[in-house]
Amino acid sequence: MASNQSARPGCEDQHAADLPQDFESALAELEALVTKMEDGALALDDSLRAYQRGVELARICQQRLDVAEEQVRVLQGSLLRSLDEASGEGGA
């Protein structure tokens, strides 16, 4: 059992390395996994692995959405400041 645990971190590193890093790829793979799981054709162990992979993919999607949302906030803040400055100059 101890040898299984010692081999596990390397497996996790390899597993993390094969996860898609872009939103679109992660979402497409997640949708495909959901379809397979909904079909009920997977064995129990395969379903558990698919579920674990799905959680990881969902996490990647959420992280990418969080980054995009923050970028939109920054852009909106810059735009609003520019508009406020322009309206302040125009009103004087």
Image (cartoon, rainbow, N blue to C red):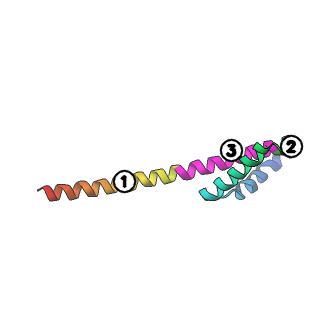
> Is 81 on the left-hand or right-hand side of 2?
left
- Label drawn at residue 9: none
Which tag, 1 or 3, sits closer to the chain's start?
3
Residue 63: % across, % down:
57, 50
Which tag, 1 or 2, sits closer to the chain's start?
2
> Is 20 on the left-hand or right-hand side of 14?
left
Classed neighbour count for the residue bearing mark 1: other residues with Cα under 10 Å, few (<14), some (14–19), many (≥20)? few
Q: Is residue 65 visible?
A: yes
- The residue under label 3 is 55
Residue 37: % across, % down:
77, 44
* Quarter occupied by the N terminus: top right
- Label drawn at residue 43: 2
Query: Which residue is at 67% across, 58% downward?
Result: 20
> Is 44 on the left-hand or right-hand side of 32?
right
* Quarter occupied by the C terminus: bottom left
Classed neighbour count for the residue bearing mark 2: other residues with Cα under 10 Å, few (<14), some (14–19), many (≥20)? few
Above or below residue 24? Residue 54 is above
Q: Secondary structure at mark 3?
A: helix
Query: Which residue is at 64% across, 47% downward?
Result: 58
Closer-to-camera residue (79/18): 79
Query: Which residue is at 16% across, 58% downward?
Result: 89
Query: Which residue is at 45% across, 51% downward?
Result: 70
How far apart marks 1 and 2 lie (CA) works out to: 48 Å
How far apart marks 2 and 3 lie (CA) works out to: 18 Å
Q: Secondary structure at mark 2?
A: loop
Q: Is residue 52 magenta?
A: yes
Q: Is residue 21 visible?
A: no
- Label drawn at residue 76: 1
Using the rendered view, name the quadrant where residue 86 is placed.
bottom left
Looking at the rendered structure, the kind of residue marked 3 is: Val
Looking at the rendered structure, the kind of residue marked 1 is: Gln
The stretch in magenta equals 47-65
